[in-house]
Image (tube, rainbow, N blue to C red):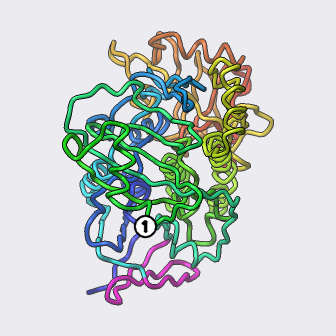
């Protein structure tokens, strides 16, 4: 077959690779996605995304499709001890600050079908399955990717979304930092055949005899996760017979349940030292892995895609130099370590097998009134590391909220009005640097003569932080804010200068 030429080659067609392909395709770039397996993996894996990731799906024009295959959590996430006492209760109900439900559950094959259809709808994005990458040669102005039966594809950039054993990461020469946090758990995915109300829908049994997780697996599915005990081999744990034995106390039998999948996973906490070098980059599990206790594994990978896509877009268009890509590692690695730290600390609370330690933990958490702020480990707020951030601004690098605004008399989410580029939000008209519009920036005035604040939430947010304007990057993280409209010219000028 003849050689092919593309702007970007993405290695791996999981959720992160497909999402990145969709993001770049929507920005007009020619993308080839290479997947080693000839058919999509048909069984569940990831099951959770939060309201920020719902916003990311919305930015890809997939709001209706993703809502149709996901299940919003109607109540709370609860941890209980062996006696059934509540140790912590976390409210997962309602709408989060990004305009989506706080917590959402899904089946990964369903999500991958949505994302696959989304990339195949774009004429400038091609998905090629059964194409294992066997060689990557980086040249000064392009990368040669060899795949399948010695077929070659040329690209300006290559992104590895090819999992924990990433070929692209190895080719980059990146090393992996490992926290040494390892626990084996049996994951059991089921389809209940009976009608039963699961309340709370998602909870954690903190029983030293066998810590267990009980959560939704998406619409019509349930998942159990059972920790491997000392003296128990992975082989004896990973069998259908053992899965049924562990499900039996929960009232699950072959008569009322279909056993969809069972697999033993080793939960680990690790990340690569660099996520981009030259014309190569990595994202998702290729860049990091973490325990599932905070539900942030796939979420972190999609944050990678959102961060990398807008920067690659500017570099591919020639509007920014390649140095902009250096901020991908510096920003995302710091933010990612927050998610890993949170997951590990939650795991240290859950994975307790000693009776005395469990009793002390239970007493402490019960005394705290099951309040997550009082009884769970406190970590720093998630914040992007050094990169495209306004100097000296405390809010720079935090995620901007997405409250409703009015359009044609109807309340809609902000991103549906502004589109994908950088946005300066203000409560009244102001001056900007002309270069801001030259790089695709726009001004959104949240007042009755511009884009009205539908609920007053925007005005409250501005007031709570004492700001007059906020500049949102394309990934909707804050570049910076100013306390007075006099500062908007400098804010927009600095952003334009930073990109150029």
- Quarter location, residue 196: top left
In this view, the residue farthest toward the bottom is 150
- Answer left or right for 380 relative to 186: right
- Work out whether residue 215 or residue 28 is closer to the camera in this orientation and state it: 215
- Answer left or right for 313 relative to 385: left
- Work out whether residue 459 or residue 272 is closer to the camera in this orientation and state it: 272
Asked if residue 335 shows in the view, the reply is: no
Asked if residue 485 shows in the view, the reply is: yes
- Quarter location, residue 369: top right
Magenta stretch: helix, strand or loop mostly:
strand
What residue is pinned by disc 1?
A: 10
Q: Where is residue 239 in the image (x, y as percent from the top left)?
A: 36, 61
Residue, x 62% and y 33% (percent of image)?
Answer: 471
- Work out whether residue 41 or residue 134 is closer to the camera in this orientation and state it: 41
- Quarter location, residue 85: top right
In this view, the residue farthest toward the right is 392
Q: Give the magenta range.
A: 134-156
Q: Is residue 478 magenta?
A: no
Q: Position of residue 396 (x, y in %)?
A: 70, 36
Q: Residues within 10 Å of mark 1 (few under 14, many from 20)?
A: many
């Amino acid at each position: 077959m003849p050689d092919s030429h593309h702007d970007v080659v993405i290695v791996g067609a999981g959720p992160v690779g497909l999402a990145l392909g969709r993001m770049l395709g929507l920005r007009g770039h020619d993308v080839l996605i290479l997947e080693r397996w000839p058919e999509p993996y048909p069984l569940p894996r990831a099951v959770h995304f939060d309201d920020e990731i719902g916003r990311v799906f919305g930015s890809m024009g997939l709001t209706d499709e993703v809502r149709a295959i996901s299940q919003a959590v109607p109540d709370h996430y609860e941890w209980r001890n062996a006696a059934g006492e509540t140790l912590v209760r976390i409210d997962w109900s309602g709408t989060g600050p990004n305009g989506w439900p706080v917590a959402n559950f899904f089946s990964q094959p369903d999500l991958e079908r949505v994302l696959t259809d989304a990339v195949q709808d774009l004429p400038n994005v091609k998905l090629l399955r059964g194409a294992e990458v066997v060689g990557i040669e980086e040249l000064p102005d392009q990368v040669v990717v060899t795949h399948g039966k010695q077929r070659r594809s040329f690209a300006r950039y290559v992104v590895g979304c090819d999992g924990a054993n990433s070929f692209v990461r190895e080719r980059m020469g990146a090393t992996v930092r490992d926290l040494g946090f390892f626990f084996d758990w049996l994951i059991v995915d089921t389809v209940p055949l009976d009608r039963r109300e699961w309340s709370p829908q998602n909870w954690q049994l903190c029983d030293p005899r066998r810590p267990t997780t009980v959560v939704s697996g998406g619409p019509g599915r349930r998942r159990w996760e059972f920790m491997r005990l000392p003296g128990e081999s992975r082989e004896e744990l990973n069998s259908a017979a053992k899965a049924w034995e562990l499900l039996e106390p929960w009232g699950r039998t072959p008569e009322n349940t279909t056993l969809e999948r069972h697999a033993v996973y080793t939960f680990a906490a690790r990340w690569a030292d660099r996520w981009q070098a030259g014309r190569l980059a990595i994202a998702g599990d290729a860049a990091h892995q973490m325990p599932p206790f905070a539900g942030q594994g796939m979420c972190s990978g999609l944050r990678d895609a959102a961060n990398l896509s807008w920067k690659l877009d500017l570099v591919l268009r020639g509007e920014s130099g390649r140095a902009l890509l250096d901020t991908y590692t510096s920003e995302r690695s710091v933010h990612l370590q927050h998610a890993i730290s949170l997951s590990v600390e939650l795991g240290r609370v859950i994975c307790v097998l000693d009776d005395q330690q469990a009793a002390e933990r239970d007493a402490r958490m019960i005394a705290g009134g099951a309040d997550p702020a009082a009884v769970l480990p406190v970590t720093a707020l998630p914040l992007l590391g050094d990169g495209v951030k306004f100097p000296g601004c405390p809010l720079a690098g935090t995620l901007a909220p997405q409250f409703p605004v009015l359009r044609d008399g109807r309340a809609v989410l902000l991103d549906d009005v502004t589109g994908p580029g950088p946005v300066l939000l203000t409560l009244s008209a102001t001056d900007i640097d002309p270069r801001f519009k030259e790089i695709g920036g726009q001004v959104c005035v949240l007042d009755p003569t511009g884009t009205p604040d539908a609920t007053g939430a925007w005005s409250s947010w501005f007031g709570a932080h004492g700001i007059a304007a906020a500049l949102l990057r394309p990934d909707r993280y804050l570049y910076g804010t100013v306390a007075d409209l006099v500062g908007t010219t400098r804010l927009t000028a600095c952003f334009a200068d930073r990109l150029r």
